[in-house]
């Protein structure tokens, strides 16, 4: 009987200690923000989005490049069906920190505290007006003791696409 009580007590202690980590939500640990162009962009143009994150103390978010078998790398994309595209290979990111990660037992690349990325995006030539660009950011956050499951947050970036000036339209006679 004592052995059963001791086992139940041990299980209860483990649950109590694990509860704070389980209660943490990815969007509370990493807060993302995206800012689009202040001025209108031309149809077909490439413009920049400033994507930034504030990371809670004791946590980190992984970089866009990781070794196989490691954490989920940072992924930035626009869902299909929208008149925008991200030029992923041209994203400008700060150099990540690198260290042996006890969660994966390998060297990982990560950001702690904060990070700011410059994300180039293009708008379709047929797009016009005030549009909402949905930016999906998939990331994984870990502390020294626990990793959260990968999480995707969608940010909305307002973008105004200006009409082409008269006389500049293709295929029309003046």
Image: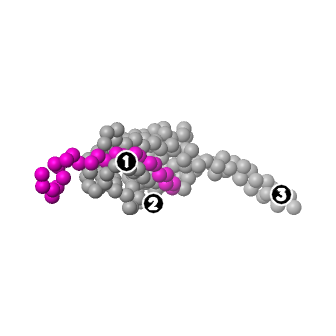
Residue 139 in sight here: no
Tell me the CA gap for discs 1 and 3: 64 Å
In front here: 14 or 140? 140
Residue 33 is situated, as x and y percent measured from the top left of the image, at 45, 42
Query: SS class of the residue under badge 1?
Result: strand
Q: Residue at x 74, y 56 (%)?
A: 11
Q: Residue furthest left?
A: 174
Find disc 2 in the rendering and name its residue. 69
Tell me the CA gap for discs 1 and 2: 42 Å
Q: Quadrant of the N terminus?
A: bottom right
Q: Nearer the viewer, mark 1 or mark 2?
A: 1
In front here: 31 or 149? 31
In front here: 11 or 111? 111
Residue 30 in sight here: yes
Marks 2 and 3 close (CB-CB < 8 Å): no
Query: SS class of the residue under badge 3?
Result: helix
* Residue 21's disc number: none
Find disc 3 in the rendering and name its residue. 5
**Magenta-tinted stretch:** 150-174
Q: Residue at x 44, y 46 (%)?
A: 110
Q: Is residue 150 toward the left or the right of residue 40 in the image? A: right
In front here: 62 or 136? 136
Tell me the CA gap for discs 2 and 3: 39 Å
Q: Residue at x 86, y 58 (%)?
A: 2
Q: Residue furthest right?
A: 1
Q: Earlier in the sequence, mark 2 or mark 3?
A: 3
Query: SS class of the residue under badge 2?
Result: loop
Q: Is residue 168 toward the left or the right of residue 26 in the image? A: left
Find disc 1 in the rendering and name its residue. 130
């Amino acid at each position: 009987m004592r052995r059963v009580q001791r086992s139940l007590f041990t299980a209860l202690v483990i649950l109590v200690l694990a509860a704070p980590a389980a209660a943490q939500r990815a969007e509370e640990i990493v807060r993302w923000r995206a800012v689009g162009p202040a001025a209108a962009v031309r149809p077909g143009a490439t413009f920049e989005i400033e994507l930034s994150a504030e990371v809670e103390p004791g946590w980190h978010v992984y970089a866009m490049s990781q070794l196989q078998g490691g954490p989920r790398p940072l992924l930035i994309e626009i869902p299909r069906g929208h008149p925008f595209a991200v030029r992923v290979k041209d994203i400008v990111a700060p150099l990540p920190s690198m260290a042996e990660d006890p969660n994966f037992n390998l060297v990982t690349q990560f950001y702690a505290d904060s990070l700011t990325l410059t994300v180039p995006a293009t708008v379709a030539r047929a797009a016009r007006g005030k549009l909402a660009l949905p930016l999906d950011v998939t990331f994984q956050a870990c502390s020294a003791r626990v990793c959260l499951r990968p999480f995707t947050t969608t940010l909305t970036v307002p973008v105004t696409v200006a009409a082409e000036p008269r006389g500049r339209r293709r295929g029309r006679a003046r």
